[in-house]
Image (tube, helix red, strand yellow):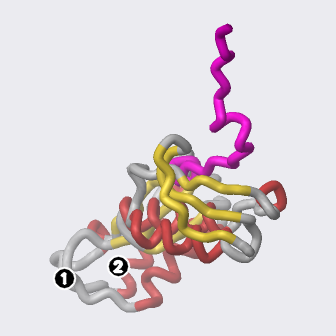
Amino acid sequence: MEMPIVNKIEKANIQQIDLIDFVAKSPILIFDLKPGLWQEMVIKEKEFRTFVKEINWEEFKGKTVGITCSVDAIIPAWAFMLVSVALKKVDANIYYGSQKEVEAELFFDNLKNMDLTDLKDQRVMVKGCSNIPNPTKAYIELTNLLVPHVKSLMFGEPCSAVPVFKNK
């Protein structure tokens, strides 16, 4: 008599979370202040205001934009504020930082905004080996978000899980 093969992992009803799902899907544009600098060192207010006025901001309309400066320069806070005002007029989603910094910030924004209702009192598996920005911080943040809500938390794959937390 042959016994049917039973997939115990499927029957375990484990909810899986892959951190890669929280990586921002939309492209990120970077606005570099470098072209508005005098001798790539400092900002002269009058020239910088002219620089900001002459930019076609429509290319940033509705986009995610990181404001940064690719050279080591003396930049007053008001310069970032002027650029932010111009970007806000075209409904840009504005961040400070390089491409990688903005990607990381968007990732953590997405993570913090995740809907936890479907995970209430569930067994949850956090997939390992995700190619994400700052993975250690991401796993810590996710753990802090999940522990108050889930029945149990595991790391890895269902076939080789590492138990992390179990609500008694």
In the foreground, 74 or 154: 154
Q: Position of residue 152 (x, y in %)?
A: 67, 64
Residue hosting label 2:
47
Measuring 81% from the left and 63% from the top, which residue is drawn there?
Answer: 120
Whether residue 86 is visible, yes or no, is no
Front residue (pair 161, 111): 161
Judge whether residue 9 is colored magenta.
yes
Q: Position of residue 29 (x, y in %)?
A: 45, 54
Q: Residue at x 43, y 90 (%)?
A: 77
User: Which quarter of the rendering shows the C terminus?
Assistant: bottom right
Amino acid identity at mark 2: Glu
Can you give x and y, in whole percent of width and height, for residue 144 in the image?
61, 76
Describe residue 40's horizontal placement relative to residue 21 as left or right.
left
Query: Residue at the spot x=83%, y=61% of the render?
Result: 117
Which of the numbered marks, if any, corresponds to residue 41? 1
Q: At label 1, which amino acid type do we have?
A: Met
Magenta span covers which residues? 1-23
The quadrant in which the N terminus is found is: top right
